Each structure stands twice: as C-alpha cells, then as structure tokens.
Amino acid sequence: MARHVVAPVAEIPPGGRKVVEADGKRIIIFNLSGEFFALLDRCPHQGGPLSGGILCGLTQSDAPGTYRFSRAGEFIRCPWHQWEFDIRTGKSWFDPRRTKVRPFPAAVATGAELAEGPYVAETFPVLVEDAYVVLEA
Amino acid sequence: MNLIRPIASPGRPAAATLGLVDVDIHPRVRDLSEFRPFLSEAAWHRLVTYGIHARHGFHKGYPFPKAAPLACRRDAWPPGGGPPASDLPFLREQLLDRYDMDIGVLNPLQPSGQGDVNDGLSVALARAVNEWQVEHWLRHEDRLRGSIVVPYEDGAASVEEIRRWAGDPRFCQVLLMSRTSEPLGRQRYWPIWQAAAEAGLPVGIHAFGYSGHAMTNGGWPSFYVEEVQEHATSAQAQVSSMVIEGIFERFPSLRVIMIECGFAWMPSLGWRLDATWKRLRDEVPHLRRAPSEYLREHVFVSTQPIEEPDRPEHLLDTIEWIGWDRILFASDYPHWDFDDPRLAIPSTIPEAKRALIYGGNARHLYRR
Ligand code: FES
C-alpha cells in the first residue's frame, strides 16, 4: 500500500467529502467532525457509485411508536437501492459481517511530517505549515 | 492522482449471448412544455391551467414517499439539468452504452395522462406522449423502442391510438398501468385487447397508476414498503380477471407482460385458480382449459425487482413453473430500484437460461 496525500485538510470540511483516485481505485474521503475516513466508491450490493449518495444517520426503534435518531451524517446511503453503510467501518446495516464497503486508512499529517516521504507525488504544493489528508491505498 | 477517470463501462453480461434487451426504461419530459407542440391550444391551456389529476386524494404529489426524489437513482440526474431520463445523451452514457444494450423499451409513466380524472386531457396527453417519444427519442436512437401509451379508461380513444401507431416498427407494445378503474377483463377494456391483437402487439401492464380505489383490499396502507408489495396483488387481480372473463379465448393471439410486478405469485395463483375452476367450472363455461394454461401461454413477466429468496433454488422452481421463455430482463432505469444487468440476474440460473432472460425471450416476443 502506498501513502497518498489527497487534499489539504481545509479542502474537506466537516460533513464534506471528496472523491479521489488512488492505486487505480475511486475512493471517497469523508470528514466526520474532523476525523477522516475513506471508502471504496463502489457499493458491494450491485456496484452503485456511493459518492452519488446522501449522508444520513441511524434511525432505530426499540418498539413500534418510539424512534431514535443518532449519529447524524455518519452513514452513506447508496444512490441506487438505499442500503446504508457506516462510514467509520464500511459495514452495511443489514449484513455487517458479509456486506461491507472496502475501507482504507486515512489520517491527517502536517506538511512538516510529509517532507520526510516516501509519498506519491501530488498536484498541489505541500506546505510545511499546513495539514493534509493522507490515504493508504 | 486527483484526476478522476470516469467509471469504466463494464459492458453486457457475459451470459447475454442472445443479446441484451431492457424492457423497462422510463423516459421523462424535461418539463411539460416539451408536450406543447403535440397538444391543441385547448389541451395545452387545460394542462397548464388545471393540471394533471390522478384519480386519488393526493393531487400534489405521491401518496407515499419514494425513497429518493422522483423515485430516481440520485446519480441519474443529468449534469446538464432536467430530471432523470430526460436527456438522451446521458441515458445513452448511463444505460445503453454502459451495458452495451441492443434494445431498450421506453415505458413513459406520469406525466402521461393515463388514468387522469379528465378523460379529454387523458386522451390528448396520451397522444402527445406518443408523438413525443418519436420526436425526442426514437428518431434519434435506433436502439430504443416506444410503447403506445393509451388512455385506457376510454376504449374507443385507446383503439384509435393503437391503430395510429400499429404500423410503425419503432413501437413494440401497448402500455397500460396495473391499477385501473375496473378489472382489466371487463368489457370496457375489450376494444384495447382486440386492437392490440389485431396489430400483433403485446400489451405491457406496468405496476402503479392511481385508479381512485384504495390500493389494497383493506384500504390505504401507511408505508411505501407496503405500496411496493401491492404490485403483486394488483397484478394477480388483473390477470385473474383477464383469464376468467375469457379474454384469451376471445383474443387467442394476445400476449401481456406484467412489468415490475414481481412473479413468484404466479405459480400459487395458477394452483388456486385451477383448484377453484375444477369445482366451479360451470360458472365460467367459456373457459376451455385450466386457468393456469392461459397464464402460462399468454402472460409474460419482467425481472425487476426480482424475488430474492434465501434459498436460490426456490427462484429456479418459480421460474420453472412460469416458463423460462416467459421472463424478460428489465432495469427500471432511472428509478432508485434499478437493476444492474450484470448483477441482478443470479448466476444460480444456468447460463443458457440467463441468455433467454437477457434478450432471447424479448426478441421473440416483440419481433421488432
Ligand atoms: S448498488 Fe448500492 S444498494 Fe444496491
């Protein structure tokens, strides 16, 4: 796995996302309140492009008539058949053990750390004083 | 690395050796003004002043939420604007080219005027939709076929519309919705069956439509999940009516396709009809054969959304009963429950049979 510097942190605000291509794969980078996560842009159900979906949360019910909504913005919903995937793990709500989007490690690093390499060359300048999102793929 | 290549086109499924035909594509007008050239001044005035009104109590929208805006895939909105499936180049890119399809059948849904409370508007709009299919789609893309949209509550006007297009090989079927004012075997619809049979055209009956009746026998349900299940029950009511009223005795060459209605209900319906017929045959002496025989000979089904039993062999058993030559691939593009041809037809179905589903059966049925 190579490490790819995919964006300055400021380019993907909390709640935002960006589709990148790394190692020949389309990968979506998500910012959940400052934490970064990355998922393959391909739904494990029938291959829909997850990046075209909306973010949602988790609606649950312990009994008919009572509803709980939590984890707003932490699930991506496939634009095709609406399956819900946990952005933190890539797991599907229905079949978390077997049906899972491939996750990739993503993290933040400072320009100073990145000066060390080895990293895949970028199309934007890496400045020592800024922070960047680094993807392993 | 931040150059994103477009998603590669996967092409047709390897098993589609008899061609790939999609029998359920839903084109849509960008906005109503696309119909204007095909409407009289009076009809246009009525349309923009009074609007379209289905025979049900929710005039300003769907009675149930549709999972996504306009019930469509969220990635199907054309980059140049307009609703999904309103833009031919984008439809080519996302469907015809992407899956290397040979033929795609257009089934225009609303706004099409079908089942409108205003009969005159229903007739005018159905005609406009047919002209629009030719001018906006069929003239520009040889792979597409149109459906003759008929104002089915008006038998005489429907016949006129069928005859108008019957000789045009770009139209491959007549199109109805599955929820009608009366069951489809009733006499008011006979002119449609007769005209379709005379023209040698099959009749596609697509799930949905708002007839004015509650969509279940017990009234209006609460959830969209329930509405989706109703397609199987309206389909059963319609094909039972057609069989028992003797439609297939009167019009022996007639073929119907139940589109987006599922199909696993068909064996059980056949068993039950046959059992009752054995006891009450003399109530319907015009039936010369067991009801299930008419079902198997005259009724075709489409795949999307296909039943997904836990044990795949149950699907095979079901299709075995219906007939491997009676089932047609459908994607339902651009709707949210779209089926990808490469993944929706389970590989537990033997390859030669998948080839029939992907294209062989449709080519044989439509012959255009
Ligand atoms: S392709 Fe994503 S839910 Fe079906």
Image (cartoon, coloured by chain):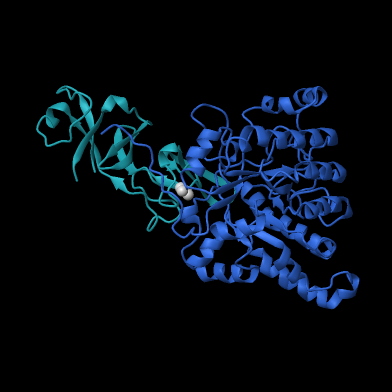
Residue at 68% from the left image edge and 57% from the top image edge: B232
| Apparent colour of chain B | blue
B260 or B67: nearer the viewer = B260
Query: Would residue B307 be visible to someone looking at this image?
Result: no
* Res B270 → quadrant: bottom right
Q: How many marks?
A: 0
x and y, in percent, of residue B136 in the image: 63, 32
x and y, in percent, of residue B330 in the image: 58, 52
Query: Would residue B200 be visible to someone looking at this image?
Result: yes
x and y, in percent, of residue B18 in the image: 52, 59
Residue at 44% from the left image edge and 37% from the top image edge: A52
Direction from residue A108 to residue B330 in the image, left or right: right
Residue at 77% from the left image edge and 74% from the top image edge: B274
* Res A122 → quadrant: top left
Most distant residue in the left direction: A116
B360 or B120: nearer the viewer = B360
- Residue A124 lies, with reference to residue B324, above or below; the image says above
A126 or A109: nearer the viewer = A126
| Apparent colour of chain A | cyan
Quadrant of the snapshot with the N terminus of chain B: top left
- Residue B19 lies, with reference to residue B56, above or below; the image says below
x and y, in percent, of residue A29 in the image: 32, 36
